[in-house]
Image (cartoon, helix red, strand yellow):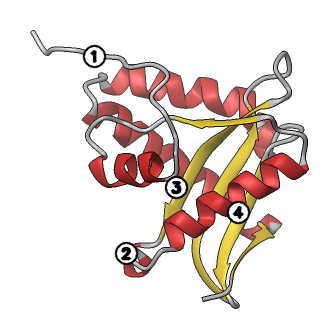
């Protein structure tokens, strides 16, 4: 396995944004948000991070490649302009047929290297509570819980 990152080309970007939006929306709904609220959050994220359908300054979108075979995608960037040293993993997705082979771990390690090369001092992420596999991966890499939201349906 020779894992590497390659900047996503223009042709793939629109598909990535659409898939990322759909995944984020569904994660919010699965976590208890209404469809309307999930749609609002997706719209807000697009306005901030993809104005005009293009990545905002500093947002990096990659194909994750094993040799030359695409195995997933990665989106990292500064969390906000006011905290340039604090970077975020906004999305990391390994294609289903490639899961369980160490590509998720490798993608996260490459994300850390890339963020550090761009001046990041800290790399954070959000993982929904129901995603136990991802939570296990992040914990095994040394990521710590910094906040926790809880809800109960009424």
Question: What residue is disc 2 on?
Answer: 100
- Horizontal side, residue 76 vs residue 141: left or right: right
- Residue 13 visible in the displayed image: no
Q: Earlier in the sequence, mark 4 or mark 1?
A: 4
Residue position marked by numbered label 1 in the rendering: 150
Q: Where residue 40 sits in the image (x, y, percent)?
A: 50, 21
- Residue shown at the point (52%, 45%) measured from the top left: 142
Identify the residue position indicated by label 4 in the image.
110
Q: Quadrant of the C terminus?
A: top left
Q: Nearer the viewer, residue 81 or 3?
A: 3
Residue at 71% over, 52% down: 112
Query: Which numbered mark, 4 or 3, is in the foreground of this view?
Result: 4
Rendered view: 27 above or below 43: below
Residue at 36% x, 39% y: name it. 27
Image location (x, y in percent) of residue 59: 80, 43
Residues 106 and 73: in front is 106
Question: Is residue 60 left or right of 92 when viewed as pictured?
Answer: right
- Neighbor class of circle 4 (other Cα within 10 Å; few <14, some 14-19, many 20+) is some
Q: Secondary structure at mark 4?
A: helix
Q: Which residue is mark 3?
A: 19
Q: Mark number for residue 75?
A: none
Q: Is residue 143 left or right of residue 82?
A: left
Disc 2 element: loop
Q: Is residue 107 above or below residue 3?
A: above
Q: Nearer the viewer, mark 3 or mark 1?
A: 1
Quadrant of the frame with the N terminus: bottom right
Circle 3 residues within 10 Å: few <14, some 14–19, many ≥20: few
Image location of residue 37, percent across then percent down:
40, 19
Judged by depth in the image, the label closer to the viewer, 4 or 1, is 4
Q: Are discs 3 and 1 less than 8 Å apart at CB?
A: no
């Amino acid at each position: 396995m020779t894992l590497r990152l390659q900047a996503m080309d223009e042709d793939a970007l629109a598909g990535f944004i659409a898939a990322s939006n759909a995944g984020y929306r569904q994660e919010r709904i699965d976590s208890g948000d209404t469809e309307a609220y999930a749609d609002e959050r997706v719209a807000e994220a697009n306005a901030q991070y993809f104005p005009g359908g293009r990545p905002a300054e500093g947002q990096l979108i990659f194909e994750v490649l094993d040799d030359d075979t695409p195995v997933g995608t990665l989106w990292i960037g500064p969390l906000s302009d006011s905290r340039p040293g604090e970077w975020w993993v906004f999305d990391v997705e390994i294609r289903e047929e490639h899961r369980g082979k160490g590509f998720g771990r490798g993608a996260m390690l490459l994300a850390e290297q890339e963020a550090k090369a761009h001046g990041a001092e800290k790399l954070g992420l959000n993982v929904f509570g129901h995603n136990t596999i991802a939570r296990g991966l992040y914990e095994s890499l040394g990521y710590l819980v910094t906040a926790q939201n809880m809800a109960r349906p009424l």
